[in-house]
Amino acid sequence: MTLTEFIGTYQTLTKEEKDLINKNITFRKFNAKEYFLESGNRSNEIGFILSGIFRYFFYDSNGKEITAHFMIEKEFVGSATSFFEYMPSSGSLQAITDCEIIVISRQSWELFCRDIKNWENSFQKILNEVLIKKTNFQRGLLNTDAKTAYLKFLNTYPNVAQKAPLNYIASFLGITPFSLSRIRKAIASL
Amino acid sequence: MTLTEFIGTYQTLTKEEKDLINKNITFRKFNAKEYFLESGNRSNEIGFILSGIFRYFFYDSNGKEITAHFMIEKEFVGSATSFFEYMPSSGSLQAITDCEIIVISRQSWELFCRDIKNWENSFQKILNEVLIKKTNFQRGLLNTDAKTAYLKFLNTYPNVAQKAPLNYIASFLGITPFSLSRIRKAIASL
DNA sequence: TAATTCACTTGCCAAATGGCAAGAAAATTA
DNA sequence: TAATTTTCTTGCCATTTGGCAAGTGAATTA
């Protein structure tokens, strides 16, 4: 799915608007483990994921690495605080698998804001949707046991469950890698 | 803090805009336990809390009541899905203490969208901020033990911790009321 | 005030999860 | 391919948290 197709599900774009978008984006590939954004840096771009998986992670007050979010195809990779408020990011965005993305630079972003009616509004909506989904999902994790949490994860992000390392998933779910390993074993023997 | 003052922290309002707002809002009081919105209903208003505490709760797949959110003064009470997308709400909004709010009806809302520049945009930003705070807080709960979670809660919502019933707080934190009671005891004896 | 209900506490035990060490398996590098 | 590193698994035990029953205390109602 292209970027214009995706935006098209939120607002109708004229031919000119689509052209404007397509002329002002670039493609980029990431190898697994490469960074889209490293902690402490400011970001001047947003990525729309065509294929692959990214994760957002940070270190908690005990120095433990926490993966707080996974991003997959048809989602955006980027730090809202960093891009929109020009603040240094408190976490890192890293490719888990090889990835292909469409890059929107700050310059292009501003161009789109100016020349595409409702651009900013649609984007806000998209961001909101993601956040609501995320809170709801996390809420579901809080009020259940580890096994149910993993099953829910498996159901919601089947692809990520398959491709992301165990310890990323474990910290995302708020359990230890040991527990997750045992849970997987238990599930496998059903 | 009035509504205009609050919005004023997001965008500058002209005298006319402030007047428009003040002429098209109403005040309302809630006694403790009264509902702002009941599960299954659609909502045609948004409330800005002047004083008191509301909670959002729903029933999970096991029929257990879950309090997923607390709202306090200077925050909005309302269901985004219900108000903006005109969907029946999947949870209820209830006053925990006696409350005073400013009510924005759908009619007023549409008036503000039309006549106040950036109104909708500011609102989106506010909504986003709330959501980001909420996800971050929940994330913190996921990756710690119950005691630390409660201390964090105590620190973030001292007022709620004092005034909300134990079982609301417990389900919010994802622990049992029994555990919370014990944690409180442990903390008290420090 | 007395009666009743509701919210909270506490003790006991069970279940779930964490922590650590050792080892197996997989991936990476030489 | 062999060597090395990294990731994952598993056993053992400690700790945390849950579940339930009984009891206490507070709030509400009659």
Image: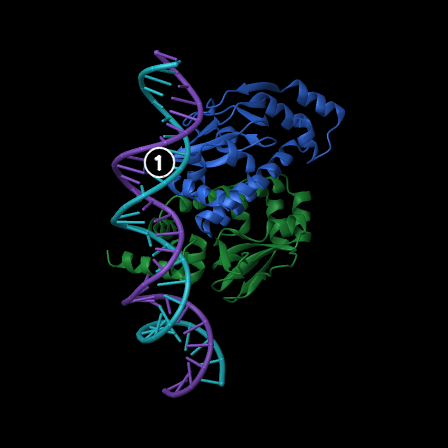
Chain colours: A green, B blue, C cyan, D purple
Q: In this picture, is B1 found above or below C4?
A: below
Residue bearing mark 1: B64
Q: Is residue B47 left or right of residue B21?
A: left
Of residue D28 and residue A132, the one placed in the foreground of this image is D28
Badge 1 amino acid: Lys
What percent of the width, then of the height, locates residue A156? Answer: 39, 49
Between residues D4 and B181, which one lies in front from this camera angle?
B181
Residue A9 shows in the view: no
**Exactly how many numbered labels are in the figure?**
1
**Chain identifier of the residue bearing label 1 in the image:** B
Q: Is residue A43 left or right of residue A145?
A: right
Answer left or right for D4 relative to B26: left
State the residue at coordinates (46%, 52%): B144
Residue A90 in picture, x, y percent from top left: 60, 55
Which residue is at 63% across, 54% downward? A23
Q: Which one is nearer the viewer's eye here, B166 or C27?
A: B166
In depth, the one of A5 and D11 nearer the eye is D11
Q: Quadrant of residue B100?
A: top right
